[in-house]
Amino acid sequence: MKLQLASIFLMAGLVWACSQSTKQQEEDNDYELSFYGEKIEQLSVVAAADVRGKLETADSVELQVEGIITEVCKKKGCWMKIDMGNGESLTVRFKDYGFFVPVESQGKIAVIDGVLKKEINEHHGHHHDHDHKEGEACHQDENVSEFVFNFTAKGVILKEDKI
């Protein structure tokens, strides 16, 4: 009897531990999905090209955004950029520095869930400067816009084509 109870508790513990993983994988019809941070469901997803319009009446808004990752922190995946079109990108950081995405995520489709903010464009490359290898140049856009769009994600879904 004690052995059966111990087995039940062990199995329950294993199930719980597996469900607490920060990276989970699922599949949908077209893509293999990998989850980072909080597991999110795709609800009212906005295309990255349309986020500018979401901030016409507010400086921040909570939403889900989908777009193609154009750049990722090469050290540990602690930030990424998503293409907004027209040469603009959305800088994504992760809530409380609590999770990261794989450094090889560039080119993948991401769905991010969190808070989008429009901020005055000051010298925002400071963190990025530290992420580049010593002697490697930091990319600076000559056509700097008045505002930058920053996103703090609580969860990320990476979509990868099925092979």
Image: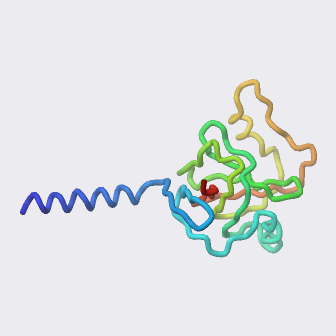
At 14% from the left and 62% from the top, the residue drawn is 5
Q: How many marks?
A: 0
Q: Outermost residue, top direction?
A: 135
Q: Quadrant of residue 102?
A: top right
Q: Quadrant of the N terminus?
A: bottom left
Q: Outermost residue, left direction?
A: 1
User: Looking at the picture, how far across and down is residue 147, in whole percent?
Assistant: 85, 57
Q: Quadrant of residue 55?
A: bottom right
At 53% from the left and 57% from the top, the residue drawn is 37
Q: Outermost residue, front direction?
A: 163
At 40% from the left and 60% from the top, the residue drawn is 19
Between 123 and 108, the one nearer to me in the picture:
108
Between 125 and 15, the one nearer to me in the picture:
15
Decide if residue 109 is on the left or right side of residue 139.
left
Decide if residue 75 is on the left or right side of residue 12.
right
Q: Quadrant of residue 77?
A: top right
User: Looking at the picture, how far across and down is residue 14, in whole percent?
Assistant: 30, 56
Relative to 16, residue 107 above or below: above
At 70% from the left and 29% from the top, the residue drawn is 133
Q: How is the image coloured?
A: rainbow
